[in-house]
Amino acid sequence: MVALQFRQLSVPLGQRIAVRDVSWQKLEAILEELGDHRAARIAYNKGILEIRMPSPEHQVDVDKELIGDMVKILLEELDIDCECFGSTTFKSKVMESGIEPDQCFYIQHHELMRGRRRVDLSVDPPPDLAIEVDVTSKTQLDAYEALGVSELWRFESGRLQISVLESVKYQSSQTSLTFASLPIIELISEFVAQSLTAGRSPTLRAFRSRVRQLG
């Protein structure tokens, strides 16, 4: 058997590789080897480890930051408290799953996570809202389901998709659990598109103004 260190693997930008039959102990060792300061992102579910490199397009990074900022504006304008955990690694040995979202928020469970810097899913709840920009694979979706993330936003091809956890499976939804009174799909899609010509700051100001009108 030939043993390779994961640092020896080269994943092209915008691509992903899947490695099968990875035990939980191996996953922990791989995460330690890769470290926290890396571009690569991981998804793990029941022995399948997926390593992906973000797209080379600058717009992907812009979109995830912009959508995260729009969520923060929504929460502020609606007087909803939250704790933002960015792209923290979430993993559960019991559920044999792990994931690193582009952005995530504790909203319903924000009080439990106040002041925390690391998450331990053996005692902590999963995030209430996770955001993924660009293509989301089956491994990622399976991991989110297994970890019990109640709401997942996926932004692909200029359009927001909302998935809500019902029992143990995601169902497509036209409304957000947290922002049920607002047309979130249309709002996010519209203002991400607007940012391409108007720029980030003017877009966020316009978004805040629209939310106040709708509220």
Image (spheres, rainbow, N blue to C red):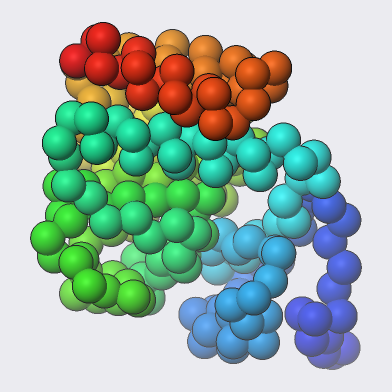
Query: Residue 126 at what x, y percent from top left?
Result: 28, 58
**Left or right of 111 in this view: 37:** right
The picture quadrant where one finds residue 196 is: top right
What residue sits 38% from the left and 30% below the top? 163
The image quadrant where one finds the C terminus is: top left
The picture quadrant where one finds residue 116 is: bottom left
Query: Residue 197 at what x, y percent from top left?
Result: 70, 17
Q: Is residue 63 visible?
A: yes
Q: Is residue 184 visible?
A: no
Frontmost residue, 188 versus 79: 79
What residue sits 53% from the left and 23% below the top? 203
What residue sits 72% from the left and 51% below the top? 54
Q: Is residue 186 above or below residue 72?
A: above
Q: Is residue 38 above or below residue 205?
A: below
Frontmost residue, 196 versus 104: 196
Query: Residue 10 at what x, y percent from top left?
Result: 87, 68
Question: In the rendered picture of this protein, how many numbered marks are placed on residues?
Answer: 0
What residue sits 75% from the left and 56% below the top? 53
Query: Residue 32 at what x, y percent from top left?
Result: 59, 87
Q: Residue furthest left?
A: 111
The image quadrant where one finds the N terminus is: bottom right
Frontmost residue, 214 versus 140: 214
Q: Is residue 11 above or below residue 188?
A: below
The picture quadrant where one finds residue 136 is: top right
